[in-house]
Amino acid sequence: MGRIVLKDVAKSFGDVHVIPPLNLEIEDGEFVVFVGPSGCGKSTLLRLIAGLEDVSGGVIEIDGEDATGMPPAKRRLAMVFQSYALYPHMTVRKNIAFPLKMAGMDKAEQARRIENAAKVLNLTDYLDRRPGQLSGGQRQRVAIGRAIVREPAAFLFDEPLSNLDAALRVGMRLEISELHERLETTMIYVTHDQVEAMTMADKIVVLQAGRIEQVGSPLELYHTPRNRFVAGFIGSPKMNILEGAEAEKRGGHAIGIRPEHIAPSATTGTWKGVVGVSEHLGSDTFFHVHMDGRREPLTVRAGGEVSLHHGDAIFLTPDEEKIHRFDHEGLRIA
Amino acid sequence: MATQHSRAAARTMISPAVILLLGWMLIPLGLTIYFSFLRYNLLMPGANPFVGFENYAYFFTDPAFWPAVINTLLLVGGVLLITIVGGVLLALLLDQPIWGRGIVRILVIAPFFVMPTVSALVWKNMFFHPVNGLFGQLAKGLGFEPFDFLAQAPLASIILIVSWQWLPFATLILLTALQSLDSEQLEAAEMDGAGALSRFRHIALPHLARAITVVILIQTIFLLSVFAEILVTTNGGPGNASTNLTYLIYAQSLLQFDVGLGSAGGVFAILLANIVAFFLMRMIGKNLDL
Ligand SMILES: Nc1ncnc2c1ncn2[C@@H]1O[C@H](COP(=O)(O)OP(=O)(O)OP(=O)(O)O)[C@@H](O)[C@H]1O
Ligand SMILES: [Mg+2]
């Protein structure tokens, strides 16, 4: 059980209003990802839910119960910190046992749960080591182990993978997703990594300056971003935004087109430009195309085998169906 | 220092420093050991014959010897206990965002800057004195008989004075250690259901273990040789009640003018310090390899 509802939750540090009143519902068993640029208040929001910060206004409900004034321990939430926050002087076993010991659970039950968690997380061989003797990925798993033994109502993750190298991130990403499938517990996950957000989430919450810009499934956000900010934030490489004549021709103040929805050609096309930098990734090639009257190059995705080089002329044809139109305020025109 | 030539040159260059340092240490030590085997009393000038271990025998059988050893250990242990418990508590307090924290910190550190003789005199005359002292006045004001601290509880009074001097040192070291504790660890413990006391017991205290050992080591070295506080307050008395080894050596060599006996005591003090240091090092070694 882990239905979390935020009603008009706000937070300010002195005069700085980090989070203006905000409403959000998180269903039981959902995997929710908070994304947003650095400093937008993701961690703060997570800490408000955890109870590590007091709200400046509003109500937090967990399973229909008002949890606004509850101390963190009473909320039945478990948090995995970015720095892991393991206890350095305790062995892995003691680290994982700590929340159980604090709850006064009997020894046999403690041992059973620790064995279980260690098996799930592949930690059995490391139970008697100290955190200092583990690799980053192993430490991360210990931190997760310490969270799951409590059988919490929901897990809170604050950028848990940002200290790991790329290969390990992919592995841990899958492990966390799998854990979610198995436990079916609510998880709230903070990241600013696109790919993590898109691949793991049932629901993505895009934040900017403490405000929720859009809430939806990864594909909803990709296909129908509500405004220019979300359009630019979801998808990699970023969506191209064009203003002026081309936009007006299509009935908007600005239009957006993703790099993968533009067909390049050496001979014919709607728009004409000059190839700047090209990035060859093997499976794909990204061209940065310079066009007259635009300062920023347009990013275009081509297949792996396109022989166009720096300085060549290039013709581009956008897929008219896939063009997003935005009005003066940056809101989507349906 | 690749070539033989440059090695020789280097050796020549550093030799004055090495010789000076060695001489600085070895000559006093050698002389002390040498004197400890002589009958050498300044009141009986003349020959100073070699007498073997006679001085040591006198020193160990001196009625003041065992009381002095016990007093020394009580003094060191008592001060360590007070400064570490008090230091941890003060560090916890100063780590809180209380109002006027900067001023409180300076106040806490201030006693460390006061010379031992001065602070002992201040305590003796302004606090402990049964007639003029603050405590005496207070007792009288409340209708009690004033307590003559230095006469009735001389060692405890000296422990109090020395603790007051060393508390800032312990507090300072423990405070810096406490501030290096990762706040996320405390928050994690809070989420794990640990109350304030459990957080202190399971997270903060183990984190402080290393700093506490450092405090114990450094303070022990200095506390074994407490002298000025005793000299200006009780003169080791009444009787031997507040005589520690340092003071006993002083009393024998300078009050009784017996250089040989004092030297023997000095050699014993060196041995005792080394034994204590040996145990401390083992303790630290265990604690440092976390
Ligand atoms: N204790 C505090 N006092 C004052 N301002 C704070 C405090 N904690 C956070 N802030 C401010 O609140 C804003 C949001 O911080 P927060 O840590 O939630 O960002 P974030 O979205 O997690 O960023 P990042 O992705 O870099 O971790 C920031 O502008 C930060 O400066
Ligand atoms: Mg953050």
Image (cartoon, coloured by chain):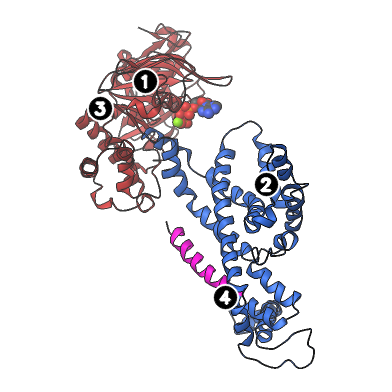
Chain colours: A red, B blue
Which residue is disc 2 drawn over? B109
Dot 4: element: helix
Quadrant in the picture for residue B77 = bottom right
Q: Nearer the viewer, mark 4 or mark 2?
A: 4
What's the distance in space between the residues labelled 2 and 3, CA to CA?
Answer: 52 Å
**Residue under mark 4: which chain is it in?**
B
What's the distance in space between the residues labelled 3 and 1, CA to CA?
Answer: 18 Å
Q: Position of residue A144 (x, y in %)?
A: 31, 38
Q: Are marks 4 and 2 on the same chain?
A: yes
Look at 72% across and 77% down and name the residue there: B253
Q: Amino acid at mark 1?
A: Val
Indicate whether residue B277 is drawn in magenta: yes
Q: Position of A57 compared to B26: left or right?
A: left
Q: Are marks 2 and 3 on the same chain?
A: no
Dot 1: element: strand
Q: Amino acid at mark 3?
A: Thr
Res A205 label: 1
Res A294 label: none
Q: Quadrant of the N terminus of chain B?
A: bottom right
**Residue under mark 1: which chain is it in?**
A
Query: How crowded is the residue under tag 1: few (<14 C-alpha within 10 Å), some, or many (20+)?
Result: many
Q: Amino acid at mark 2?
A: Ile
Q: Position of residue B94 (x, y in %)?
A: 59, 39
Compared with B216, A196 (above or below) is above
Dot 2: element: helix
Res A185 label: 3
Residue A240 visible within the image: no
